[in-house]
């Protein structure tokens, strides 16, 4: 992300406002999906929730839930109390 922002300001990191504007406007594709900053400066990207299951006598990770890229929201449906 830093590299893309530096390219967009032609390496002129001294102009902090221009650099921060470029950084917040940067959106890149990663191995886990697209990543960008929201209006508050938080990273926004895909979230993968996995669970451990026993298959054929072995414990393995399996994809349980995929939350696609979106703005952060307070959603407690996925939080389970102990």
Image (spheres, grey):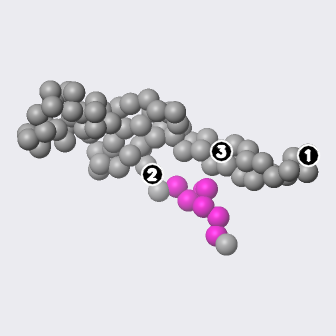
Find out whether residue 10 is within the magenta segment: no
Mark 3 falls on what kind of element? Answer: strand
Q: Furthest residue to the right?
A: 56
| Residue 1 percent across, percent down from the top left | 32, 36
Determine the image quadrant of residue 13: top left
Residue hosting label 1: 56
| Residue 45 percent across, percent down from the top left | 46, 40
Work out whether residue 25 can be spotted. no
| Residue 2 percent across, percent down from the top left | 28, 38
Find out whether residue 76 is within the magenta segment: yes
Span highlighted in magenta in the image: 75-81
| Rendered image: mark on residue 73 | 2
Work out whether residue 51 can be spotted. yes
| Rendered image: mark on residue 13 | none
Mark 1 crowd level (few <14, some 14–19, many ≥20, 10 Å Cα): few
Task: Using the numbered discs, state the Cα–Cα distance from disc 1 to disc 2 in whole angstroms.
Answer: 38 Å
Residue hosting label 3: 65
Q: Residue at x 59, y 44 (%)?
A: 48
Mark 1 falls on what kind of element? Answer: loop
Q: Is residue 42 above or below residue 69?
A: below
| Residue 51 percent across, percent down from the top left | 71, 52
Determine the image quadrant of residue 38: top left
In the picture, measured across the screen, residue 26 lies left or right of residue 59, that is: left
Q: Residue at x 47, y 56 (%)?
A: 74
Mark 2 crowd level (few <14, some 14–19, many ≥20, 10 Å Cα): few
Q: Residue at x 52, y 36 (%)?
A: 32
Mark 2 falls on what kind of element? Answer: loop
The quarter in which the C terminus is drawn is: bottom right
Task: Using the numbered discs, state the Cα–Cα distance from disc 3 to disc 1 in whole angstroms.
Answer: 22 Å
């Amino acid at each position: 992300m830093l590299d893309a922002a530096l390219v967009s300001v032609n390496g002129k990191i001294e102009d902090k406002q221009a650099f921060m504007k470029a950084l917040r406007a940067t959106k890149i594709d990663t191995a886990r999906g697209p990543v960008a900053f929201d209006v508050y400066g938080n990273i926004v990207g895909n979230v993968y929730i996995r669970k451990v299951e026993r298959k054929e006598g072995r414990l393995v990770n399996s994809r349980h839930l995929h939350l696609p890229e979106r703005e952060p929201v307070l959603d407690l449906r996925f939080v389970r109390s102990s």
